[in-house]
Amino acid sequence: MASASAAVSINRTLSPPSPLQPSWRSPQPLRCTHSERGVSFDPGSAFYRSDSALGRDLAVLAATLHRQSRPDPSSPFLCLDAMCGSGVRALRYLAQAGADFVWANDASDALRPVVVANLSRLHLSHGDGQRRWVVSHLDATRLLAERYLRREYFDVIDVDSFGSEAEYIRAAFLSLKIGGLAYLTSTDWRSARGYGGKCSLSSYGAYIRPVPYPNEIGLRMLIGGAARESAMLGFHIKPVFSYYASHGPIYRAMVQLCHGKEDDISNYGFICHCKSCGQTQTFGFDELGQISCGCADRADATSITVVGPLWTGSLHDASSITEMLNLAVEWGWAYTSENGTTLQKLLDTMIEESDPQLPPGYIRLDEIASRAKVNSPPLGTLINSLRKVFNYLLHQCMIN
Ligand SMILES: C[S@@+](CC[C@H](N)C(=O)[O-])C[C@H]1O[C@@H](n2cnc3c(N)ncnc32)[C@H](O)[C@@H]1O
Ligand SMILES: [Zn+2]
């Protein structure tokens, strides 16, 4: 099984494909058609979406904090971008997250001149001759499996995949250092919305049917699949953050691979939504025979929708997100936005969502108002009132 110590030797024993084999065209002349947080690059013919810059900002912030908090911060910090497209992430891991080495891979070898030209903005080697980056063109799963077989383990593995491809998750965990971060992606919105039952079952082991909060379900499906894969390998995971972006749409989760299997499976189970009353509840495997809703319509089995098994725990880690926000403020990233949403707004929302007492699912305010046959108050007003009531009750409990 993966051993963190073996990973340290990667910079010395690495035998990567040459970044500039004679059969390849030389890198194209440098152009700077795009820029993300001050890093310039040219996407060329690669698949590139400026809308995804926020997802890349999050990755860079989390990776930077992870680099600083590792048990041995002086060891080389190694990243692998398994589906790199233009190489923008690889470039940002190098230039912004302080990676000592990045492996940039994309199955399409037609992208080689683009990726090499972009990474060539940074020197190929450190002063001591150690490589800073390599570019390869392999299927991601094959590349990751090869790294594992060579005992080359990475601190961050980023797999920015299309669709519901999930076979790379296990391969990514195998070649990740224990404690390392895996940045996983799904664009399988059909499954998240409950129209791809067989697909989500084969990819993530979850059967999904339509519920009113499909964006959250897509994230829970992806994290649940990762939790299952990690358990199979004798590990467990902790979500650092998860992020749904409507362009695509895209479901992203940054998870940390942690040592040992977890006996507690209370974060992995089933979500039950009742159409009659709008309630959502979670059920564990040991409660499978008891799934029902306490509302008046409990006899109507068709009012109940059960999805899972999937991740029912917290979608983000509050302390990691708080540190990411602090770093974003320090770097001057928090309040500026290239695409509408600021990191400050996004990370503040994630901090609020991280409350471990918050159950999965939600009911929309307009639905509550329509069920109660009243006009809905402004959301902010309602939240502030609920907070006041909560604080009052808490205060009463403490003084009694
Ligand atoms: C979403 S794009 C990557 C975008 C890039 N990560 C970014 O942030 O701009 C996905 C890339 O994965 C590549 N790809 C698709 N299947 C792959 C596979 N099985 N292994 C490696 N790369 C693959 C595609 O050629 C494409 O460039
Ligand atoms: Zn009900």
Image: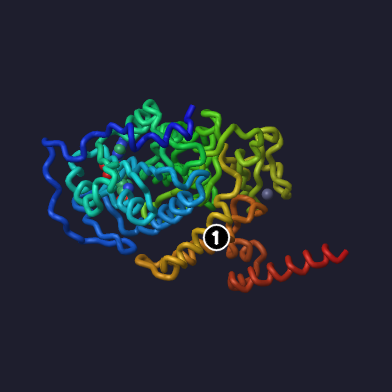
Taking depth in this image into account, of 192 and 393 the one nearest to the observer is: 393
Taking depth in this image into account, of 233 and 186 the one nearest to the observer is: 233
Q: Name the spot of residue 389 as percent of width and height, x first.
A: 74, 68
Q: The disc labelled 1 sits on which kind of residue? A: Thr
Location of residue 385 (image quadrant)? bottom right
Q: Name the spot of residue 20 as percent of width and height, x first.
A: 17, 40
Which residue position is annotated with label 1? 322
- The answer to whether the beta carbon of the residue marked 1 is less than 8 Å from any atom of ligand 1 is no
Q: Name the spot of residue 309 as percent of width and height, x first.
A: 57, 37
Give the quarter of the figure containing the C terminus.
Answer: bottom right
Tell whether 196 sits left or right of 45.
Answer: right
Tell whether 182 sits left or right of 106.
Answer: right
Q: Is residue 162 visible?
A: no
Which residue shows up at 55% across the image and 60% down it? 322
Q: Is residue 315 visible?
A: yes
Which residue shows up at 67% across the image and 53% down it? 357
Ligand 1 placement by image quarter = top left
Taking depth in this image into account, of 199 and 317 the one nearest to the observer is: 317
